[in-house]
Image (tube, helix red, strand yellow):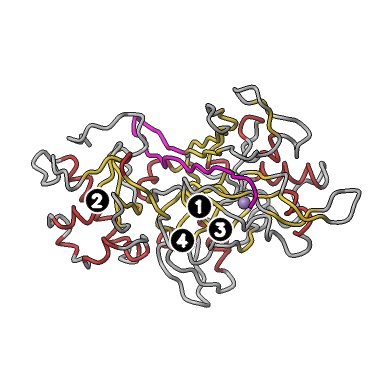
Amino acid sequence: MNAWFEVNTQSDFSIYNIPFGIFSHDGSSPRIGSAIGDQVIDLRAVAGLGVFDALEINKKVWDSDFLNPFIALGKSKTQKVREILQQELTKENSVLKNNDQVFIAMSEIEMHLPVQIGDYTDFYSSIHHATNVGKLFRDPENALLPNWRHLPVGYHGRASSIVVSGVPLHRPMGQQKPADSNPVYGASKLVDFELEMGFIIGRESKLGQRISTESADEYIFGKVLFNDWSARDIQKWEYVPLGPFLGKSFGSSVSPWVVTMEALAPYQVPGLKQEPKVLPYLEYSGHRNIDIKLEVAIQPENKEETIISRSNFKYMYWTMQQQLAHHTVNGCNVKIGDLMASGTISGEDQESLGSLLEITQAGRQSLTLTDGTERKFVQDGDTVILRGHCEKDGKRVGFGEVRTQILPAL
Ligand code: MN
């Protein structure tokens, strides 16, 4: 595809991407946009030119402050919107060409939370991450718990505190238990990031209905970057026996652009070998991992950033289709806008670890940043940045970034 629109080859938002998000401009109310290069495409303005008329989409959809009503149109229409945008951006006589109502510089707009998230579930599906954590806290010889290779372990998280890139979070207060004293109340000393990706549910299922691995793709609208913040000291004391709670729910951060499964399809790769063989409801066919290059940077306040990890979504052991099949095998229903996160994505090497917990061996070692300062965990004023993109045959499809500053405790 040759776009008449000039796009830098290093841009995540090429003609092959066409993601969806929610933006506002000059104090306007939020509405739906797409992205090309360094420009936002105002889809209300595009719709006003009649470009989507054949799809008979209610005008109100373009003015929504979340993507949910757009996603609810169904893939038959949302895929068409993306294809029409690609056609308009490549055809010479397009009505979009040189139309300054349609394009707005990204530097001039504000991005908002892309979807109204009803429920948020976090999985634990990277085998290297689960093995590293098991070695640190349990048994180096038997790092994985007995269930791990049989089902995608997960827990129900908190949706209300999920924020979009750019929204700072305060270091949480809470209970911690020093090894040699009674529990204390105070600011967490061990704030950590988790390099994750999330997928957005694009179709509702009914209570009692199971979604199979084969039909799962119909229920997945697209993906985002996800930083699943953790206060390791609060978490360590509280999580027995029911699992993560306040050490997680103080905040999680998502990237603003939802990249569709159609845009990611060319980058699918075979999944990891699963041994032992999974139960039949978790079997799947085809290439269901995705080659998405991921990186994490820490930027101390008013300093330059240091890239501290390079990982890849293809290191996932359990696929999204298996996660969804497992999530609904008991009849639990899913809704449009629900967010399912991967769990921390770590690779095999020291350079590809998805949390400071693993990078610093739970604070036993420290990490030196380019400004010479050392980190064991995230400090006040630090900004953590996650980025991700796919690249093949000179075609790049990316997510931009999710960037979050940690402020002092309130
Ligand atoms: Mn997590």
Q: Amino acid at mark 4?
A: Ala
Which SS class for mark 1? strand
Magenta-drawn segment: 388-410
Q: Which residue is mark 3?
A: 323
Q: Report x, y in % for residue 333.
A: 51, 72
Inspect the image, locate mark 1, and give the three-letter code of the amino acid beneath it: Gly
Mark-to-mark CA distance, 2 and 4? 30 Å
- Circle on res. 198: 1
**Label 2 amino acid?**
Asp
Which label sits in the foreground, 4 or 1? 1
Marks 3, 2: nearer the viewer: 2
Badge nearest the viewer, 1 or 2:
2
Between the C-alphas of marks 4 and 3, the distance is: 9 Å
Image point (10%, 47%), residue name? 95
Mark 3: secondary structure:
helix
* Of the image marks 1 and 3, the number of the one nearer the N terminus: 1
Residue name at image x 49 percent, y 36 percent: 293
Q: Which residue is mark 2?
A: 42
Instruction: Report helix, strand or loop for mark 2.
Output: strand
Q: Find disc 4 in the rendering and name its residue.
A: 216
Above or below: residue 145 compared with residue 158:
above
Callout 4 crowding tier (Cα within 10 Å): few <14, some 14–19, many ≥20 = some
| Marks 4/1: CA–CA distance | 15 Å
